[in-house]
Image: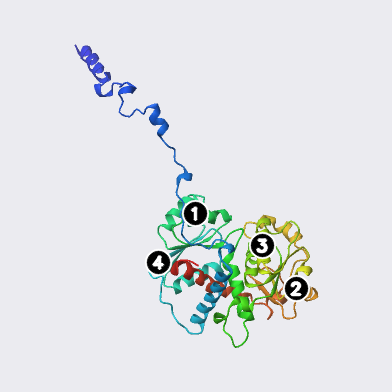
Amino acid sequence: MLQSLIRRSATAVVAPSPALIAVPASRSFFHLSTHQQKQQKTYSTADVPTVSGVPHLLTDNDLSPQQLSDLIQTACRFKHQVKVLNKPSDAPLAGKTMALMFSKRSTRTRVATETAVAYLGGHAMFLGSQDIQLGVNESLLDTSKVVSSMVDGIMARVGSHSEIETLAKYSTVPIINALSDLYHPTQILADLMTLHELYTPKGQEPHLTAPTKTLKNLRLAWVGDGNNILHSLMLQLPKVGMHITMATPKGYEVNAGILKQAQENAKAAGTDLGVFHDPKEAIRDADIIVTDTWISMGQEEEKKQRLKAFEGYQLTTDLIESSGASKDWKFLHCLPRKQEEVTDDVFYSPRSHVFQEAENRKWTILACIDQLLVKKGF
């Protein structure tokens, strides 16, 4: 009797429930016909709409000659307002936040941007490589959409220029290029502001004088790597009427596409653009001599090779003066500086204006933020 009950109980357990009985495909509520399956779409990043109508500063080509001149004067006006008049701003960015997305470390750019945002009454949120890894743990597209939905502007310091282009493509707020491998527009604004101050005639004020008047026909010589700083200088100098000559070692020339655009800018402005490998050729008749690091972040493994390639490019007083530079030549460097690039007798001499140049990063970045976040465009 007991065995009979066990057999009957087991049968009851394994017997299929009516609710679990297979339903023919034609009767299933969840079955998709071949036609319906063909109508389904597989979505991808290509289907994410891009954002248009948002003003950005991504390359030096984003500024017309007039916009460039106005921006330099605006920076000078802010500097005069703060350092001479001791006048606070009207806090136009009160309650607003600017994200500083830096995949590469920085001293001048970070300090300049944070203090500029604070002066305008806003909050600067620093997001370094340990806080946010662009394109690593989250795609650039996703990062752009998320971050831009929560802030009012973005200052981005990236590796490849394509990264900042992707960020701008999907951002709903203005983006300023704080450095990419091809361009460094805010640095060149500081360089031009510094030269504008230095060449403004006595008795005149830089914020009341057009840079096109003070800088016209000056000649700048670059000696060093064909990098992002040189790219930006090549594109911007013709807009204020300046000539540029450059000397780079073979194999370290500028980007060919950017050189072509710079030559077109120079032709339109009627200015000279000279390309050399011999530093002496570039320095001849130069009013301003400029160099930069030979080994940028990410190029440390190339140090030995680069130091050998750049032999003879170290700027010394003897090299500059024996090359026939202008009698009143001046020196600039965007920092940080290394001894192999320029000797102390140049870097710390009265001819050097590198610290004034560094300070002006603040005023030019302030002008950019004011133009894009407060005035809503150039």
Could you say which disc has been placed on residue 169 in the image? 1
Nearer to us of marks 4 and 3 is 3
SS label for mark 4: loop
Q: Can residue 133 be seen in this view?
A: no
Task: Determine contact: label 4, label 3, CB under 8 Å.
Answer: no
N-terminal of the two: label 4 or label 2? 4
Q: Nearer the viewer, residue 26 or 294?
A: 26
C-alpha distance separating marks 1 and 2: 44 Å
Query: Between tags 4 and 1, which lies in front?
Result: 1
Labels 4 and 3: the sequence-earlier one: 4
Where is residue 19? Give x, y as percent: 25, 24
Give me the C-alpha separation between circle 2 and circle 3. 32 Å
Which of the 4 image quarters holds residue 93? Answer: bottom left
Q: Earlier in the sequence, mark 4 or mark 1?
A: 4
Left or right, 64 with respect to 21, comes to: right
Question: Which quarter of the picture shows residue 268?
Answer: bottom right
Q: Residue at x 62, y 56 (%)?
A: 298
- Amino acid at the residue labelled 1: Lys
- In the picture as drawn, the residue positioned furthest to the left comes out as 1
Residue contact between numbered discs 4 and 2, judged by CB atoms under 8 Å: no
